[in-house]
């Protein structure tokens, strides 16, 4: 009788072990449950925001001001660069001016498309505006030349043009760096992929060209007249 009881007890224990093992295996085979992230009321997830914006990242008023201001800024540099072939620029200055003109015209086109895609105002970059500070008065973006300074550059030829062009363009590029710094310090700005990529590219390119122009300026013959 005792032997029979022990057998029954062992059989029962074995059944419990088998059931427990099966239950554990079943739980292990179940997919892990993900606890949902609580999104603050009134805000959207990134996916919902992208859908609401038709897939376009959000942008700010600071982004718009930067793109508009940089179009005007680039427009003046294009005017300055276009004078090099007709004002007797030396070969290295001529090559630099041509590079600046091509690059900044391409960037103006990029910024124009960005603004138009968002139905924002695109500044006028026609030459007569460029000669008058873009907007017809002396309220200029950082580093831009005044109408008098542009006229001074327009009258110069040969070595004098080279010196003025390099001096003014260094200042012009430094102004662009200031505009990028202002953008990146604005809360919420440069989150748009195109704005961020463009502004950081401008920063790198302008620093590189400033260094090159300073070397070129040192190689210029001395001139008593200064801007």
Image (cartoon, grey):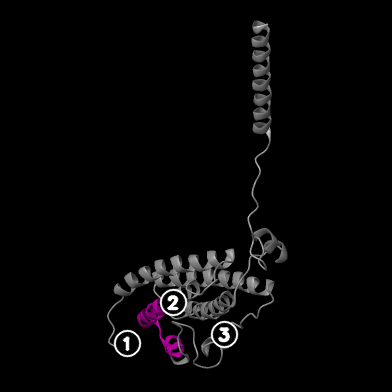
- As for residue 155 lying within the magenta part, the answer is yes
Q: Residue 209, percent across and down?
A: 41, 69
Quadrant showing the N terminus: top right
> Separation of disc 1 and disc 2 at Cα?
24 Å
> Separation of disc 3 and disc 1 at Cα?
25 Å
- Nearer-N-terminus badge (2/3): 3
Badge 3 vs badge 1, beta-carbon distance below 8 Å: no
- As for residue 164 lying within the magenta part, the answer is yes
Identify the mark at residue 199; answer none if there is no mark: none
Q: Nearer the viewer, residue 160 or 6?
A: 6
- From the viewer's perspective, is the residue at label 2 or at label 3 nearer? 2
Q: Quadrant of residue 26?
A: top right
Q: Residue 114, percent across and down?
A: 63, 71
Identify the mark at residue 127; answer none if there is no mark: 3
Position of residue 35 relative to residue 46, above or below, is above
> Separation of disc 2 and disc 3 at Cα?
24 Å
Q: Quadrant of residue 204?
A: bottom left
Check disc 2: other Cα within 10 Å, few if <14, some if 14-19, many if 20+.
some
Badge 1 vs badge 2, beta-carbon distance below 8 Å: no
User: Helix, strand, or loop for circle 3?
Assistant: helix
Q: Residue 47, percent across and down?
A: 68, 58
User: Helix, strand, or loop for circle 2?
Assistant: helix
- Nearer-N-terminus badge (3/1): 3
């Amino acid at each position: 009788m005792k032997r029979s009881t022990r057998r029954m007890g062992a059989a029962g224990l074995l059944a419990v072990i088998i059931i427990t093992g099966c239950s554990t295996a079943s739980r292990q085979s179940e997919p892990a449950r993900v606890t949902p992230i609580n999104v603050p009321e009134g805000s959207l997830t990134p996916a919902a925001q992208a859908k609401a914006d038709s897939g376009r990242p959000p942008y700010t008023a600071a982004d718009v001001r930067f793109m508009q201001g940089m179009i005007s800024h680039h427009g003046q540099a294009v005017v300055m660069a276009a004078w090099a072939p007709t004002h007797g620029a030396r070969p290295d200055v001529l090559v630099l001016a041509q590079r600046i003109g091509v690059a900044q015209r391409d960037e103006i086109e990029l910024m124009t498309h960005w603004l138009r895609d968002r139905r924002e105002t695109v500044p006028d970059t026609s030459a007569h505006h460029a000669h008058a500070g873009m907007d017809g008065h002396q309220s200029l973006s950082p580093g831009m030349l005044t109408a008098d300074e542009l006229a001074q550059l327009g009258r110069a030829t040969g070595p004098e043009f080279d010196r003025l062009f390099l001096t003014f363009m260094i200042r012009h590029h430094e102004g662009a760096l200031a505009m990028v710094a202002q953008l990146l310090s604005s809360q919420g700005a440069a989150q748009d992929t195109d704005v961020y990529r463009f502004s950081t590219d401008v920063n790198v390119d302008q620093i590189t060209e400033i260094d090159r122009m300073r070397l070129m300026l040192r190689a210029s013959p001395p001139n008593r007249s200064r801007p």
